Image (spheres, grey):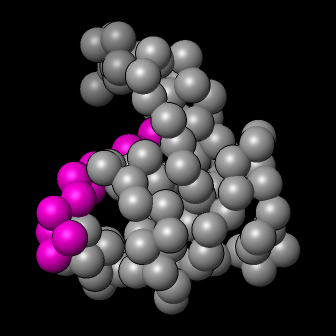
Amino acid sequence: MLIVGAGRSGRSLLRELRETPGERVVGFVDDDPAIRGRRLNGVRVAGNLGSFEAALDQTRPDVVFVTIPNASPATLDALVRTCEAREIDCRFVRRELDIDPRVVLGRAQT
């Protein structure tokens, strides 16, 4: 698996996937130049969005997980189209941090 977005959500997903038998994360893709080429929690940052195709060639994932919270629709569409052309499953992982627990638990007052 390749994770697009090495921020909090991406690193959290990595930890969860490591606890799943048979799953292996082969890299991250992230636009932060400060982490390019580094390892995060033992997984290498394989490139940025501009080099997404090269990262796919290098890591050869079966699945791409997109965790970038504020990506533009055009960026997301480009990722999906690139994955579709290579017959790679592309999934979106969204984690909302600012959720009112009263709403989630059905106790919101109107």
Q: Position of residue 8 (x, y in %)?
A: 66, 45
Task: State whether residue 74 appears in this view.
Answer: yes
Question: Could you tell me which residue is drawn at 31 percent across and 73 percent down?
Answer: 79
Task: State whether residue 52 appears in this view.
Answer: no
Give the vertical position of 7 relative to 70 (above or below): above
Q: Position of residue 37 (x, y in %)?
A: 76, 70
Question: Could you tell me which residue is drawn at 31 percent across and 50 percent down?
Answer: 62
Query: Is 86 inside the magenta-drawn segment?
Result: yes
Give the vertical position of 61 relative to 80 (above or below): above
Query: Is 3 inside the magenta-drawn segment?
Result: no
Quadrant containing the C terminus in the rendered view: top left
Q: How many labels, in total?
A: 0
Tell me the chief SS of the magenta region.
Answer: loop
* Residue in front for this viewpoint, 21 or 67: 21
Q: Position of residue 47 (x, y in %)?
A: 61, 75
76 relative position to 27: left or right: left
* Residue in front for this viewpoint, 104 or 4: 4
33 relative position to 73: left or right: right
* Residue in front for this viewpoint, 34 or 26: 26
Give the residues drawn in magenta, as a range.
Answer: 84-98
Give the vertical position of 102 relative to 30 (above or below): above
Question: Could you tell me which residue is drawn at 62 percent across and 28 percent down?
Answer: 15
Give the vertical position of 32 relative to 93 (above or below): below
Task: Specify the quadrant of the image occupied by residue 105.
Answer: top left
